[in-house]
Amino acid sequence: MSDNSARSAPSTDKATIQASASFLHALSIQHIVHYTQQNHALTPSEDATKWVLHRWPNTQEARRQVTETTLSDIRRQWIHQPARLKSNYQNALTAILLYLHHVLGWEIPKTEEKKLVDHDAKLFEKITSHAHVAYRLLQRYNTFLETFYQKRTPLSQEQIALIVALEVAPLPIDYLHHILTSPDCIEIVDNRLYLRLIHIQGRQSKGRPDKEADDASFTRYHLPLFVYRALTTFYEQHAATLSHPSMRLNRLKDRLHALINQLINDVEPSTGASSPTHPCSKAQLHFLLQAIWYYRDDVVPTLLKDIAYPARHVAYELKTLSIPNQEKQLDDIYAQTWDDKWYEKVKPGEKEQWPHQKLLNDYKKNRTKPTKYEVTRWQMHNVLPQLAGLFVKKPDIVRWRAG
């Protein structure tokens, strides 16, 4: 009995431990990085992954198991590294644990297993599980729109909610209810139509945004003209009953749930009998709406999550800075400070007397050397008169000119 027990116990001799550690050191870094990129939206650094694998403790037991002691030994080796490197090494360790656990079937500590749950992947699984129902609903929705364009019958609250969810964004039901009961959520910014959705904060708001809070965060969604027309017509037709108990959130959930299940199980007359689609529960309505956007518009999961949950991105008011005496300053900028009749004040040009001519005339008349001429000011626009005067002032030149 003791021999069998000893034979079945995991081997922990030195050679086996070294073989197990060598196996970890030999793991393909490219495989680890590729797996986490494709399946967990995590992109570890190859250098950091190599660093962690090469420092994997040699005390690793010869079992497909990573212990708390092993993880502590690894983390202790980067305790004195800079913060950026610590973050890279932690991401690399997470990628290695994901690969060991999901691909190679290793056991990891329960505390680490909880950390490795990819909530985005879980959410995406819930969305893609409605692929068939989303296809059926989209078909019937397009038929519903064609009928509406032809007959122009008044739209009900749940029909408007479905239009908003498929044309604006796959919003949660409480936000759809807020839109249908709040005409002031439509706004125009720079001649563009938007839906302004104040974020619903917690359960204390009872599914209603806190409109009284001045600092309440909000999100804007582009509003197509078709949806704008449908909403404004709905507001006009139900202006007196928007706050009626029949318009409450739970009533909307019930009616929207019934409408969607009616559409997905409705059969085209030309197709004949068809197997009924499994009904979608109320709790799954939001995932079904997101599935339509994913398959119809090829919206990537990260962007789909952003547009489906308004609180994930926040808009802001563009506030202009107040400038004191702004009107006066603007008037000063555009005030006319020049004279339109400036040309009327310009005197006509007078004939200029060149000084050298006077020097020559004096010499001819008196036969005396012209020495009285001195240049007191040079003309900026024309220096020739002064130069000519100085030139004639020389006696040889005067005689030559006079002769």
Image: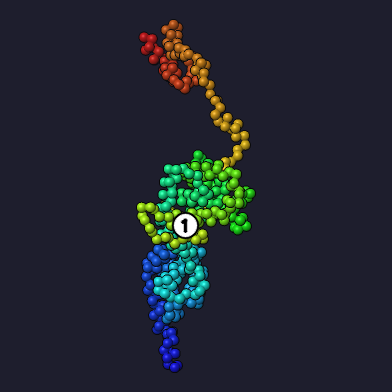
Give the image's coloring scheme: rainbow
In the image, is residue 58 above or below residue 227?
below
**Residue 370 vs residue 282, the one in the foreground:** 282
Quarter of the N terminus within the rendering? bottom left
Q: Residues within 10 Å of mark 1 (few under 14, many from 20)?
A: some
Q: Position of residue 226 (x, y in %)?
A: 46, 43
Whether residue 101 is visible, yes or no, is yes
Q: Nearer the viewer, residue 62 or 265?
A: 265
Can you give x and y, in whole percent of width and height, for residue 233 in the image? 52, 42
**Point 48% across, 15% down: residue:** 373
Residue that mark 1 sits on: 261
Q: Residue at x 42, y 43 (%)?
A: 150
Front residue of this view, candidates 160 and 292:
160
**Residue, x 44% and y 79% (percent of image)?**
60
Q: Indicate whether 62 appears above or below 324.
A: below
Asked if residue 194 shows in the view, the reply is no
Quadrant that contains the C terminus: top left
Q: Which structural element holds mark 1?
A: helix
Residue at position x 43%, y 8% in the image: 361
